[in-house]
Amino acid sequence: MTRFPSRFALFLILPVVSGCAVSSGTPATVIAQPQIAAAYLPLHGRTHLGLDSADGAAVVIAPGLAVTNAHNANLLDSRDVIGTRQDYDLLFFRTPRSALPQTALPVMGEAVTAYGQGADADLRVAHGTVREIKLCPGCIEPAWFTFAGDAGPGFSGGPVLDGAGRLIGITFGYKDQGSERLIYAYDMSRVRAELSALQKVPN
């Protein structure tokens, strides 16, 4: 099982405090890729303590089925939740939306684009470059990959795209290293593997 890096920060751990929150990424009016725009779901709700508002994102990966992070559970109606894979901080849920975005594998050194929500529930975008693709012991699918970029709170559960606009991952955390921020994302093959494992668990 993959361990999270030391001093690892989940995107929604930091509460969004009115007047004090700083959004990551840059403002975006629309998602440039039509298939991702159709699959993107902004999430808004309360923090786990219920004291402050919080934002995140989700992605429709099949008709009626979307994925986000398990730590975004408080931003969803529990009746829609299909299940979680806590080892990988993934949550799958039902949605009336239908989309089937094209997917691809991350490639070392490639430029990527991530989408998320800002502190004022506005669409945000961040750009970066893939730095590492991590395999877990005994796994066929990658556990996660990293890219350097300006994503942060609100991007949790949002899509990461390659240069062709294909979905390559779902963001789940970040780690600041000096002046640089590394963003962590689950490869889509890992997302599909965890969905398959969840579907095999008896009710």
Image: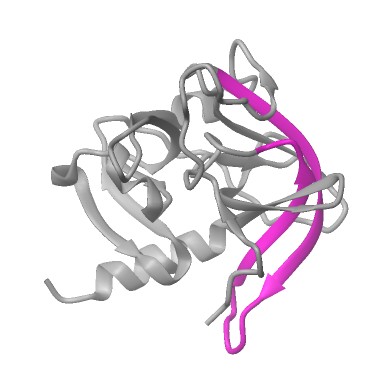
- Seen from the viewer's position, the closer of residues 147 and 101 is 147
When the figure is inspected, residue 97 is found, relative to residue 166, above or below; the finding is above
Question: Which residue is rendered at x = 88% and y = 53% of the image?
Answer: 109
Residue 50 appears left or right of 130: left
Q: Position of residue 196 (x, y in %)?
A: 36, 68
Q: In which quarter of the image is residue 63?
A: top left
Q: Give the range drawn in magenta.
A: 123-151
When the figure is inspected, residue 119 is found, relative to residue 59, above or below; the finding is above
Q: Residue furthest top?
A: 29
Res 163 visible: no
Q: Which residue lies furthest to the bottom in this view?
A: 138
Question: Which residue is rendered at x = 53% and y = 65% of the image?
Answer: 190
Q: Position of residue 23 (x, y in %)?
A: 62, 25
Question: Which residue is rendered at x = 48% and y = 60% of the image?
Answer: 191
When the figure is inspected, residue 94 is found, relative to residue 135, above or below; the finding is above
Res 136 visible: yes
Residue 90 appears left or right of 108: left
Q: Where is residue 168 in the image (x, y as percent from the top left)?
A: 63, 49
Q: In which quarter of the image is residue 131?
A: bottom right
| Quadrant of the rendering where the C terminus is positioned | bottom left
